[in-house]
Amino acid sequence: MDKILIKNGRVIDPLNGIDGKRDVLIAHGVIESVSENLECGEATVIDAEGLTVTPGLIDIHVHFREPGFEYKETIKTGAKAAVAGGFTSVVCMPNTRPVIDNPDTLEEVHKLAEEADCRVYALASATMAMEGKELTDFATMKKSGAIGFTDDGGTVQNGRLVYEGLLAAKQLGVPVVEHCEDMNFMNDRSINQGEVSAQLGCIGVPGIAEDLIVLRDLYLAERTGGHIHIQHLSTKESVRLIREAKKRGVRVTCEVTPHHFSLTESAVLKEGSNAKMSPPLRTQEDLDEIIIGIKDGTIDAIATDHAPHTEEEKAKGIVEGPNGIIGLETVLGLALSELHEKHGIGLMRIFEMLCVNPAAIMNLKGGSLTPGQPADVTITDLNRKWVVQKDKFFSKARNMPYEGMQLKGKTVTTIVGGRIVYNET
């Protein structure tokens, strides 16, 4: 069937300022119309009474591990987790094996993505082999389909390379995407340096490790006019630095993860290495400033940093275990429970950070229900209460600190390009 008619839902489309009861007609893979009382006799009808219809969610920060680490996750399994979480597009990081620093590896990712349930894009590494010594060929990688450049998983420590990368990316109209940590402050690269690290006998990672790189990159973006995108903010000072930079007109965007707006370093005492990530969970003061940054528009996007690892790897402990948690199947429930229910942040703002802004940051189609746009749609039950059960996840991995938590808000149906790819049964 080439047409789908979604009836009786509450449509929230931040880009077009819509929040009200509407019908959505999909035809031949694109949005045809959003209006009241639509009829189409030849369409498959989805009754969305009591449900919320939004543009498909877009996650601009995931690790699908393929090629090279398929035992953790594959593009296919990662995409299944994505659509179960309401995501219709994702952006993969380049820290695969081999690293996505050449057209052949990028082509392999794109070929694997053809079989995925959602749209899969990729960033290329900013430096060759992510070693921080030599920039990749930005022009060639952009021509091959890279939508931006990052050494995520590590940080480009050489400021000259970031400067030159920003100039090159500016000419190509793509962002430089930065994981901000000064490796000279990383110590045992375990958890936040503070009360909990002292209690556990770890050195920990101080917030200044992030703040210094954010400060440097904001300055370089200001000097070059290039677009810098700062990943997974975790400190109050980083939020404040970006807020001030935006006021000066610096071309900076940024993202926050669900774990950094919902948990503090104390979670490590209960969850151990399943609450270990880089940057680490911080203090309540840091979390409070992140919430302010979400409310005042400083923070542009919510991204999961979905980072699958095996139970055996995480069992190595706080210091030796790998950084990262999975997040695609819990992000919507966390955003609605923590940001909307607990902190009173409006739904328009939340879906702006999950749909509109991610598309704009990475120059992707989608992010709205504008007629003519791809028919990527998420249908959510905002009132559904559910308990996180990791054994029911579609991801291969189970590493996350939310097991047993009750959340409110769950994806019911996900549509990609006019095709129903997930339907809760």
Image (tube, rainbow, N blue to C red):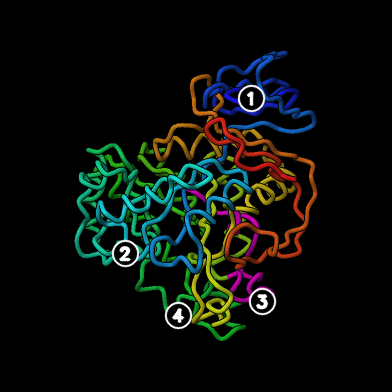
* Residue 392 against residue 415 in the figure, above or below: below
The answer to which quarter of the image holds residue 262 is: bottom right
Q: Is residue 68 left or right of residue 369?
A: left
Sequence order check, earlier mark of 1 and 2: 1
Disc 1 designates what residue? 4
Range drawn in magenta: 254-275
The quarter of the image holding the C terminus is top right
**Image point 20% across, 51% down: which residue?**
137
* Amino acid type, mark 2: Pro
**Residue 188, label in figure:** 4
In three-dimensional space, the C-alpha distance between marks 2 and 3, rounded to whole angstroms, equals: 35 Å
**Image point 53% across, 69% down: which residue?**
309
Residue 323, horizontal then vertical, whole percent? 50, 70
Q: Secondary structure at mark 3?
A: helix
Q: Is residue 425 visible?
A: yes
* Residue 270 against residue 226 in the figure, above or below: below
Q: Secondary structure at mark 4?
A: loop
Disc 2 designates what residue? 98
Disc 3 designates what residue? 269
Q: Is residue 323 left or right of residue 178?
A: right
**Image point 49% across, 47% down: which residue?**
116
Q: Given the current orientation, which residue lies at the most extreme bottom position?
A: 201
Sequence order check, earlier mark of 4 and 1: 1
In three-dimensional space, the C-alpha distance between marks 3 and 4, rounded to whole angstroms, equals: 17 Å
